Image (tube, rainbow, N blue to C red):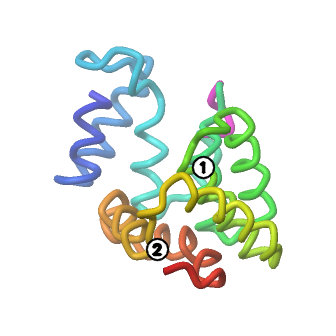
Amino acid sequence: MNGAALAHRMFGNEALALDLAQRATAIGGLDGMFGSYFANNTLPSCLMQAGRLDEAVELMLASRPAPERELYTAYAALGRWEEALIWIQRHTASFPTSFLGQVDLANALAVLGRLEEARQIMGRVLAIVPTFTLARYERGNRVGWRDRDQLVAPLVEGLRKLEIA
């Protein structure tokens, strides 16, 4: 059910996505089609997209392992940047080659006024992915979050300060 919930969250009926994700979580989170791949990670995203950020954070904090990058996104959307930074630092420590995690880390640092650190990180990102543009990154987030400005704007707020093309 979580796999279907993900598809509906991104491209279809959001109310159905939330319902499917809640039902999947109630039966243990495993997805009949995708097994454990989607276990327990769709409901928080559905809640975030529905604007229920505090509820999503509570659910994610109770998850093991905690979904670090998703917690970053939720805390960023809530404007709780110190907490967002902690979670994205954990994510990049767990997944140091995560290109998107590095972009998120630079974003959080820039929002917090740590511009030089953010520029260094984005310099490394651009060396690895020279085709990265802020416009494409924002567009991808807008598609993924169905153009929810409450979720998308914080994900590019700091990057704008870095004046990335």
Q: Residue furthest left?
A: 12
Residue at 39% x, 27% y is 38
- Front position in the image: 124 or 10: 124
Is residue 74 shown to the viewer in this render? Answer: no
Q: Residue at x 55, y 58 (%)?
A: 53
Mark 1 residue type:
Gly
Residue 61: numbered disc: none
The x, y position of residue 8, in whole percent, is 22, 47
Magenta stretch: give its range: 60-64
| Mark 2 crowd level (few <14, some 14–19, many ≥20, 10 Å Cα) | some
Name the magenta segment's main secondary structure.
loop
Dot 2 amino acid type: Leu
* Direction from residue 115 to residue 31 in the image, left or right: left
| Mark with earlier residue (1, 2) | 1
Which corner quadrant of the image does residue 91 belong to? top right
Q: Is residue 38 left or right of residue 111?
A: left
